[in-house]
Amino acid sequence: MRKYDDSYRHKGLRKRLISNLREKGITDEKVLAAIDTIPRHFFLDTAFDEIAYEDRAFPILQQQTISQPYTVAYQTQLLEIKPFDKVLEIGTGSGYQTCVLAELGAQVFTVERQKPLYEALRKFPYTNKYPGIKYFYGDGFDGLPTYAPFDKIIITAAAPYIPEKLIVQMRPGAKMVIPVGEGDVQQMFRIIKLQDGSTTQETFNNFSFVKMLGGKNKF
Ligand code: SAH
């Protein structure tokens, strides 16, 4: 059984990461505080212990990645999370972004299409800290109609287009943050659903995510 130790050294490295994120333009103090609280190295293989607080993505299981801290901060800042927001996350991956949302007080419904990743998280003791997170194994293109409507939706994989089924699951006033593009680079979109059910969209910086794929993967 792995021992999870958040040492002074790790805490110091996190402080450095926070100033790095500030320099790159992240301004939301609550988002920075959440990142400062969560031991990112717990979400990575111990081989990455020394470099876990560099601002870069790292491999996790199943050829997937834990998002770069800047990307996590950027998407979370755009979502403008408030305590008790009901959030749908597509692409649980390591669960790191999920915990950042939960640390901000959100009630998170997170969906992962790869069974081994979904199962690994069920055995990961740190997530017990956030009983408000609900984990689902499924295809994020379908969302979670049973639990809709949501106040916020975040997609953490490169979407080929904006899935209409997810728009339907937004409450009036809800926000969705989604990287859209079929090539190596995607543009960050923020969709807002208005009271009359119509939507507006804004575009932001470019990022590079792993692909959002349809269907589920058992192995
Ligand atoms: N936020 C995660 C990012 C993981 S990478 C982290 O920081 O760890 C993106 C994840 O999206 C991968 O785990 C991938 O398996 C998952 N994914 C891709 N397409 C999906 C879909 N249609 N439904 C649910 N998850 C999906």
Image (cartoon, rainbow, N blue to C red):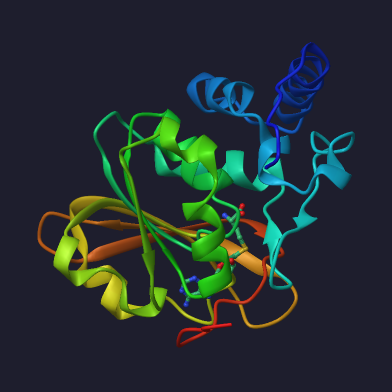
Residue 40 lies, in percent from the top left, at 68, 36
Quadrant assignment, res 58: bottom right
Residue projecting furthest to the front: 1
Circle count: 0
Is residue 35 rendered to the left or right of residue 59?
left
> Residue 39 sits in which quadrant?
top right
Tell me the residue at 23%/54% (across/down). 150
Can you say whether 192 is above or below 139 in the image?
above
View extreme (top): residue: 8
- Find residue 12 and report its horizontal and vertical position in percent: 80, 15
What quarter of the picture does the C terminus occupy? bottom right
For residue 59, side relative to residue 26 (left or right): right
Quarter holding ligand 1 = bottom right
Residue found at the far left of this picture: 196
Q: Residue at x 12, y 54 (%)?
A: 195
Q: Position of residue 194 (x, y in %)?
A: 19, 56
Residue drawn at x 70%, y 21% as measured from the top left: 6
- The answer to whether 125 is drawn above or below residue 62 in the figure is above
Q: Nearer the viewer, residue 203 or 44?
A: 44
Quarter of the image for the N terminus: give it.
top right
Residue at left offset 41%, top offset 43%: 79
Of all residues shown, which one is farthest toward the bottom? 215
Q: Nearer the viewer, residue 115 or 216?
A: 115
Up-down relation of residue 112 to residue 44 (above or below): below
